[in-house]
Image (cartoon, rainbow, N blue to C red):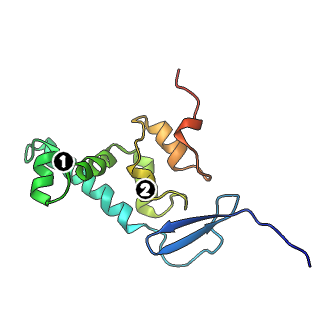
Amino acid sequence: MTTTNIAMSFYRRGVKTIIIKPDGSRVLERKESKVDNSMVKAIARGFRWQRLMLDGVYNTIYDIAEKEKICPSFVSRISRLATLSPRVVEAIVEGRHPPHLTMKDLFKPFPSEWALQEQVFLSARPIKWADLPEPN
């Protein structure tokens, strides 16, 4: 009997599990949309809350949290998504983001530089922020 080892990664997307080949592509390509609605909704909320603060409807994240009846730290994490690179937002909204990118990744602290965001969030393989070279 011969044993064959195949390198692959598994990522959870809600109730689904996605299998990723070493080259970063999905093992099973489905015809249905690859848009992650939870990420799209979170980004939309972030932009909406940012607009409400800029328009003076709310002065702080605490005001938003009170109105929405949610935790201020959650409002803070979602609001940061309004600072994502337009290319990252576009890829997520169109379902072209790498399969390894999840909501959990977007909730982690990330730099404000769009080029760095694009390098990490849109790479075919997962990259850790610590693995990037130091900026000059």
Mark 1 or mark 2, earlier in chain: 1
Most distant residue in the left direction: 57
Identify the residue at horizontal 55%, vertical 36% (top origin).
130
Most distant residue in the top direction: 136
Of the residues shown, which amino acid type is indicated by label 2?
Lys
Give 90 or 26, whichever is nearer the viewer: 26
Vertically, is 94 above or below 81?
below
- Residue at the disc numbered 2: 104
Q: Is residue 65 left or right of residue 134?
A: left
Q: Is residue 46 left or right of residue 94?
A: left
Where is residue 19? Give x, y as percent: 62, 69
Where is residue 45? Give x, y as percent: 25, 57
Give 102 or 123, whichever is nearer the viewer: 102
Q: Nearer the viewer, mark 1 or mark 2?
A: 2
Marks 1 and 2 close (CB-CB < 8 Å): no
Q: Quadrant of the N terminus?
A: bottom right
Identify the residue at horizontal 54%, vertical 72% (top origin).
17
- Residue at the disc numbered 1: 51
Where is residue 53? Give x, y as percent: 14, 44
